[in-house]
Amino acid sequence: MDTRTQLLNTFKTRAFSFGDFTLASGKKSSYYVNSKKAIFNGEVVNLLSEVLWEMTKDLNIDAAGGLEVGAIPMAAVLAQRYAMHGKPLEGFFVRKQAKEHGAKERVEGVLKPGMRVAVLDDVLTTGGSVLQAISEIEKVGAVVVAVVCIVDRLEGAREALAKYPFRPIFTIRDFGVAPPGA
């Protein structure tokens, strides 16, 4: 079984559930992908970092990250995988709001003007969270070269992010769920 299929199977058993949920976008849903139930597991970290490496190694990126909380473990494991391949990569994350103390910055980690960035997120619905992160990344002067997510729920994120190359590992169809209106 290939790495992507192993990752999908693990997400299906650890992170996917049916019920009555309200998403970050405010939408109601009969299913939920709670990536945190998966991406803090050692086996999943290994699989995820390999899949992310395969999906980004052609991008010539200097950094990878996105909005807290989903992007934090993704950026960390991808930076480690790049190091394993002898390539430098900065990981970072964007705070939803600036801290009241310290440097009071929204971007944490090393992100400089001109850096080529892959924006990461775990599960995308409308793309609103990623657009918040992209806004802060572009304020720094970094260049977004792709958006990579674990699961695209097929509810508008691709369209909202149309000006950026979009690379989901999975869509909700991979979980056997038809998107709304399908």
Image (tube, rainbow, N blue to C red):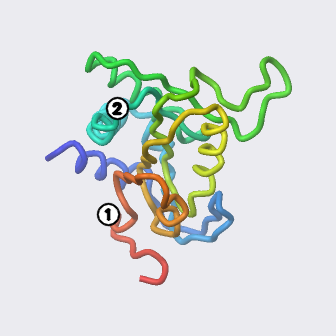
Q: Nearer the viewer, residue 94 or 179?
A: 94
Q: At 28% from the left edge and 18% from the top edge, which residue is drawn?
A: 84
Residue 137: give its label: none
Mark 1 highlights which residue? 174
Q: Residue furthest bottom?
A: 181
Q: Residue furthest right?
A: 100
User: Count of labels shown?
Assistant: 2
| Neighbourhood count class around disc 1 (C-alpha, 10 Å): few under 14, some 14–19, many 20 upward | some
Q: Is residue 87 above or below residue 12?
A: above
Q: Is residue 126 above or below residue 99?
A: below
- In the image, what residue type sits under mark 2? Asn
Q: Nearer the viewer, residue 15 or 78?
A: 78
Expressed as whole percent of the image width and height from the top left, the position of residue 149 reads: 44, 49
Expressed as whole percent of the image width and height from the top left, the position of residue 140 reads: 64, 31
Label 2 element class: loop
Q: Is residue 65 above or below residue 164?
A: above
Q: At 14% from the left edge and 47% from the top edge, which residue is drawn?
A: 1
Q: At 59% from the left edge and 44% from the top edge, which residue is drawn?
A: 134
Measured Cα–Cα span from mark 1 to mark 2? 28 Å
Label 1 element class: helix
| Neighbourhood count class around disc 2 (C-alpha, 10 Å): few under 14, some 14–19, many 20 upward | some
Residue 60: give its label: 2
Expressed as whole percent of the image width and height from the top left, the position of residue 43 reads: 32, 33
In this image, 153 relative to 7: left or right? right
- In the image, what residue type sits under mark 1? Asp
Q: Please report whichever mark, 1 or 2, sits nearer to the chain's N-terminal start.
A: 2
Disc number lying in front (1 or 2): 2
Contact between labelled residues 2 and 1, with CB atoms less than 8 Å apart: no
Q: Nearer the viewer, residue 162 or 26?
A: 162
Quadrant the C terminus occupies: bottom left
Q: Residue furthest left?
A: 1
Q: At 49% from the left edge and 57% from the top edge, which residue is drawn?
A: 163
